[in-house]
Image: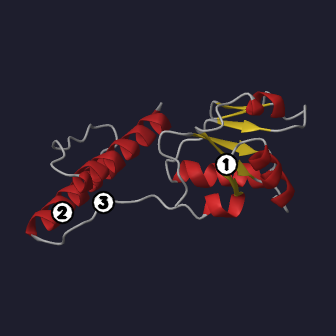
Amino acid sequence: MLPLENRDLCIYCRGVYGLRTYFRLRALKIPVACFADANKSKQGYVVDGVYCISYEELLAKDRENTVVAVCKQNPEDLINQFRKEGFSRTYHYEEVEKLERTYPEIELNAGTLERMNAFRNALYSLLSHPQETVEWRDAPDAFSAALGEVLRDAQNRGEALNS
């Protein structure tokens, strides 16, 4: 797995490969600090509040705490160039796209089944009555917290559709 913890992830090349990689990472809830591109027409472009900076601005970033994902066809030359510039954490976009979100271990027992049933009931209630607020108990573990996050996200989407 790529070393992303406590580091800024920059997608270099805001083209088709860069956007595809961005949306893959967004779905996995992996934050992207910025895009970067040498093409002046792409600089300043914003996707979901993530700005595209220039090549020179990227070179000014902290090389130890920046992970660069080069997102273009045949990225090997650029990867080598960034590594020579001191960005040791520079990767091919395919390596980044293989990232998977790690999920908490789930022990299948009576407590887990109870939480799953409570989640199912809460989600059904939310879908049946989207105008009502669904309450979720404080999360005793990471699994329950993840279920609560799904419910909050579903409720927020419902509120956005109704407004």
Q: Residues within 10 Å of mark 1 (few under 14, many from 20)?
A: some
Q: Nearer the viewer, residue 133 or 70?
A: 70
Q: Quadrant of residue 152?
A: top left
Q: Residues within 10 Å of mark 2 (few under 14, many from 20)?
A: few
SS class, disc 3: loop
155 sits to left or right of 46: left
Q: Which residue is mark 2?
A: 117
Q: Quadrant of residue 115?
A: bottom left
Q: Which residue is mark 3?
A: 104
SS class, disc 1: loop
Earlier sequence position, callout 1 versus callout 2? 1
Percent x, y of residue 145: 26, 48
The amino acid type, in three-letter code, at marker 1 is: Ser
Vertical order, 56 against 128 (above or below): above
Q: Residues within 10 Å of mark 3 (few under 14, many from 20)?
A: few
Separation of residues labelled 3 and 1 (CA atoms)? 30 Å
